[in-house]
Amino acid sequence: MLTKTNQEPINAQEVIKDFPILNKLFNGKKLVYLDNGATTQKPKVVIDRIADYLANENSTVRRGVYYLSEKSTFMFDETRRVAANFVNASRPEEIIFTRGCTEAVNLVASSLGGSILKPGDQVQITQMEHHANIVPWQLICEAKGAELKVAPINQDGELILEDFQKLLSEKTKIVSLTHISNVLGTINPIKQIIEMSHKVGAKVFIDGAQGAPHELVNVQDLDCDFYCFSGHKIYGPTGVGVLYGKYEVLEQMPPYMSGGDMIDLVTFEKTTFAAPPARFEAGTPQIAEVIALKEALEYVKNLGIEKIKAYEDSLLEYATEKLQEIQGLRIFGNAANKASLISFVLEDAHAHDIGTILDHEDNICIRVGHHCAQPLMKIFNVSATARASFAFYNTKEDVDKLFMGLKKVQSLFG
C-alpha cells in the first residue's frame, strides 16, 4: 500500500502499482481506464482484505458469542466508525450500510417520504439528476399525492439558483439533489442550497455518488440531513454503500425493510424496532464488503482528498484543452466549478461506435449512452453521449491516448 505523506503531491505512476488490473495486459496492451464515474478499480489492499476475510475469518455478525463472530462484529462496526469519520458525522450511529446510493435514496424516499408527505406537499429535485434520484421520488409522490418540482439548469450545466429558490415554499418538505452531476461534472453549491432549503423547513438529501470520491465531505459543516455514497465508486467493493443521516431525523423514521436484526421485541401481536442504525439494516449484511470498504476509505484518506482533487482538476484541465482541439467534438457541461469528467459527442459518430472503437483498437474504456439521465439528455437534445471520467491513477498519457483514439474514430467517420 502507498505510504506517501499528505504533503507530497499525487504520483500517478506510483499509485498505479497498487491496482493489479492496471498492471495487466489485455490483448498485449494495458488498460486506459476512463470509466471511473461508473465504477473505480480496486487497490490490492481491498482485494486482499475480502479474500483474507472469506478465507480466514468468515462468520456472521451480531449476537454470536464465539470468537470469529465477535471478531467479525468488531471489524464491521469499525468500518462504521471509519465511515463516520470520513464524512465527519457526529457519531457512528448516523451511518447506515446500504447496497449503494440507489438503495439509500429509496430508503429515505420510502421511510421519510412515506411518513411525512401529504397531499399537496412538494419534493424538489433538479434537471441533472440520475434516475436513482428521480424515480423513487416520483413513486412516493404518486403514492402520497405530493408534487415533484424540478429546478432548471442553464446551457453550461449549472443550476439556476434564482429559479431553484423560487420553487421552494412552505409546501416543500424534501429537497434531493446530486452533489456532482454524473453527466455534466457540475459541482453544485450544496451548502448554499441546504441553507435555502432549511429556511422553508425542508429536509435535504444529497446524492454523493460522484461527490465523495472527489470532494472533502463534512456533513456537520454542510448541515445536510442525509448524504450517501457508494463503495464501488470510491475504490471499494460493489454491493455496499453508506447513508449518513442526522440521528434525530433517523429516530423519527420508520423501518424501510423488516426482518432480523432491526427489531427490539417481536410478539405475534406487535413488534417494536431497534434504534438507528440497526432499524434500517434488516437481515444478514454484506459483511465482507463492509469490512473491505474500510480499507478503501483509509486508502483514499491516506492519499488525501484535497491532493486527489488537485491532481484530478489538473487532469481535467489538460483533457478539456486536448479534446477541444478536435473539430466536431462538443462537450456537455461547462460549469465554472466542475469535477473530473467530460461528456461529449463527436460529429457523425454515435456514442456507442466511439466506445466500441476505442476499446477494440486501444483498450480505452469510456462510458457511452444516456448515463441513467434520460431527462437531461432530452434537455440537451441528444440521445446519448460518450463520457470519460478520471481518477487519481489516470495520467496525461491516458488523455493523449484518448485524444489519438478519438482522432482515429473521426477518420473512420469523416
Image (cartoon, rainbow, N blue to C red):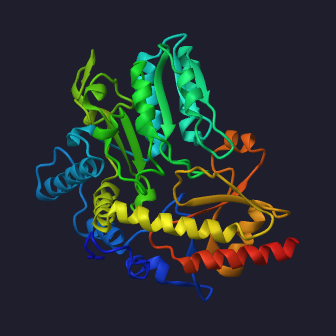
Q: What residue sits 43% from the left and 53% below the top? A: 239
Picture quarter with the C terminus: bottom right
Q: Report x, y in % for residue 229.
A: 41, 48
Residue 282 visible, this orientation: no
Q: Is residue 138 above or below residue 221?
A: above
Picture quarter with the N terminus: bottom left
Examine the image and state in which quarter residue 56 appears: bottom left
Q: Is residue 274 above or below residue 5?
A: above
Residue 19 visible, this orientation: yes
Q: Report x, y in % for residue 356.
A: 73, 69
Q: What residue sits 21% from the left and 39% below the top? A: 90
Q: Is residue 319 above or below residue 379?
A: below
Q: Nearer the viewer, residue 40 or 267?
A: 40
In the picture as drawn, the residue positioned furthest to the top comes out as: 119
Relative horizontal placement of residue 290, taking residue 122 as reference (left or right)? left
Q: Is residue 111 above or below residue 33?
A: above
Relative horizontal placement of residue 377, taking residue 167 as reference (left or right)? right
* Number of callouts: 0
Q: What residue sits 61% from the left and 28% below the top? A: 150
Q: Nearer the viewer, residue 47 or 225?
A: 225
In the picture as drawn, the residue positioned furthest to the right comes out as: 414
Q: Nearer the viewer, residue 261 or 30?
A: 30
Q: Report x, y in % for residue 263.
A: 25, 29
Examine the image and state in which quarter residue 233 appears: bottom left
Q: What residue sits 28% from the left and 52% below the top? A: 86
In the picture as drawn, the residue positioned furthest to the bottom comes out as: 28
Q: Report x, y in % for residue 222.
A: 34, 38
